[in-house]
Image (tube, rainbow, N blue to C red):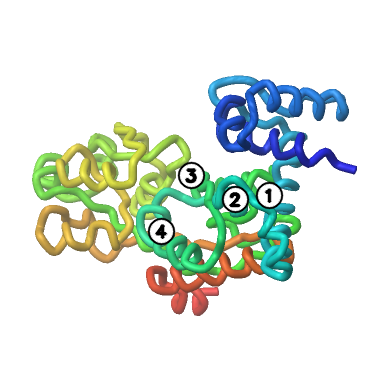
Amino acid sequence: MLDYAGLSAIAAVVREGSFERAARALHVTPSAISQRVKGMEERLGTVLIVRGHPCTATVTGRLLCRHVEQVGLLEVDLRDALPKLSQSGAPDAADSRATLRIAVNADSLGTWFIGAIDLFLRTAPALLDVVLDDEEHTVEWLRSGTVLAAVSANARPVQGCNSMPLGRLSYLAVASPGYMARHFPEGIDAASLASAPILRFNRKDGLQAQWIRRICRRPIDVPTHWVPSTQAFVDAAVAGIGWAMNPRSLVQEHLRAGRLVELMPGRELAVPLYWQVSRLAVPMLRQLTQAVLVGAQAALDLKSFRKAR
């Protein structure tokens, strides 16, 4: 038999980031959490928690956390079928809610995904733990067992998951009029792009480089500002700090007002997005998937995506 008190302690430490916060979440002492984690590590003969700030799970620890999350979903389903199980006197209403960990790219989170979450949480007794990563890398969280679902640029389903198209997120290369006058007075070519500062979200952000390769037919080294915030990315472009690829929905008002202009009108970049979700057969994951599909339908271009395929 698995020690679910120990498993819950491990999951709480990873979720909360420390033994002290895990203890508060589970209404026990930090000593009790420490003893439970130590007991599980001794029983399995391996380290499960990397002690640090924050605490993180090892590979084995992540597998156990995924199991706890899946059990939590099944328990919610069982409580719906057997309401008397919910009358056991839990100390906090939040204790009965399952926590779903999902990986999402920053631009989806900053545009359409919050609406999908809102739709899901109107009826689902759940808490969400959203992991932020580039759309090309969110599937790695699925492969490691850290999350149960992800918005991804990868169509091929991860083992144990289903993959379904969401649509295309359209990006425009934009800059302020003043920036354009300073850096592209004679137009845009390889030489002018090589000296004009760009904005990048982080080291995984390759959208600007992808756009440059499409325009110039080759990669170009460019000066770079690093701005790891979706909203600040737009603000930095409006301020004239650099040019960048931004979702159309985030910059269309600035374009209409003249605060931003496209570097080359008509040369947008459309990124295909997919929803990858565990095949675990529980109603809550089906609810989440339905909400995500509805949210994406309102914001992403699925029709042309299907035609292109």
Query: Mark 4 belongs to which amino acid?
Result: Ile
Q: Position of residue 167 (x, y in %)?
A: 47, 69
- Which of the two labelled residues, at mark 1 and mark 3, occupies the earlier sequence position? 1
The one nearer the camera, 16 or 274, is: 16
- Which of label 3 and label 4 is nearer to you? 4
Query: Mark 1 belongs to which amino acid?
Result: Glu
Relative to residue 249, is residue 253 drawn left or right?
left
Query: Badges 1 and 2: C-beta atoms under 8 Å apart?
Result: yes
Q: Position of residue 75 (x, y in %)?
A: 72, 58
As drawn, the label of residue 132 is 3
Q: To which residue does mark 1 refer?
A: 69
Relative to residue 271, is residue 6 drawn left or right?
right
Q: Position of residue 261 (x, y in %)?
A: 17, 56
Residue name at image x 34 percent, y 54 percent = 215
Q: Position of residue 281 (x, y in %)?
A: 73, 66
- Which of label 1 and label 3 is nearer to you? 1
Regarding mark 3 in the picture, which secondary structure is present there? strand
Regarding mark 2 in the picture, which secondary structure is present there? strand
Q: Which quadrant of the rendered structure holds the N terminus?
A: top right
Query: Mark 3 belongs to which amino acid?
Result: Leu
- Which of the two labelled residues, at mark 4 and mark 2, occupies the earlier sequence position? 2
Query: Badges 2 and 3: C-beta atoms under 8 Å apart?
Result: no
Query: Badges 4 and 2: C-beta atoms under 8 Å apart?
Result: no
As drawn, the label of residue 176 is none
- Which of the two labelled residues, at mark 1 and mark 2, occupies the earlier sequence position? 1
The one nearer the camera, 119 or 137, is: 119
Q: Residues within 10 Å of mark 3 (few under 14, many from 20)?
A: some
- Which of label 2 and label 3 is nearer to you? 2
Query: Mark 2 belongs to which amino acid?
Result: Thr
Reply above or below: 239 against 46: below
- Which of the two labelled residues, at mark 3 and mark 4, occupies the earlier sequence position? 4
Q: To which residue does mark 4 refer?
A: 114
